[in-house]
Amino acid sequence: MVLVFAVLCLTIFSLITFVVANNERSIVEAKINLVTGYYEADALAEKILVDILTADTIPSSSHGIEILSRWDEELGVDTTYYYCPVSPVKALYVNLVVRDDSFDILSWRMRDTDIWTFDDSINVWSGDIEE
């Protein structure tokens, strides 16, 4: 009876260990894919920046990435921006100011590409007492 109990305990503990290790492996693989995607997007963003700085005028696209310009009211200058995909739900966004002899990077960061939507499907009590 003790032998059956010991085998059962060892089997359960080995299954738990296997499930935990498998879950941790999938988390590590997702992190590896995100980091790899970030550095690939960063290298592409650097190539696009070089293309922008070496061109006479700001190109409309480079390496298959659309480059846009807009007037920034707060800074009072034209800003150039583009984004390089990192993963299906993240992208590296670059925003910069290009001048004749220099440039300033306003932002160079990874953000989510999904649009957040408000979920109001749960009927939550607002605090009002209905009579």
Image (cartoon, rainbow, N blue to C red):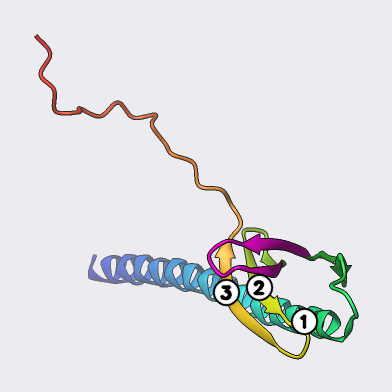
In the image, is residue 88 above or below residue 92?
above
Write down the quadrant of residue 5 in the picture: bottom left
Marks 3 and 1 sit apart, C-alpha to C-alpha, by: 14 Å
First in sequence: mark 3 vs mark 1:
1
- Tag in front: 2 or 3: 2
Q: Which mark is residue 109?
A: 3
As helix, strand or loop, the secondary structure at mark 2 comes to: strand
Write down the quadrant of residue 87 in the picture: bottom right
Q: Amino acid at mark 2?
A: Val
Image quarter in which the C terminus is found: top left
Q: How far from the left and from the top, in percent, is residue 67?
A: 79, 66
Name the residue at 58% across, 77% down.
106
Q: How far from the left and from the top, in percent, is residue 79?
A: 68, 69
Marks 1 and 2 sit apart, C-alpha to C-alpha, by: 9 Å
Image quarter in which the N terminus is found: bottom left
Residue located beneath label 1 in the image? 49
Residue located beneath label 2 in the image? 94
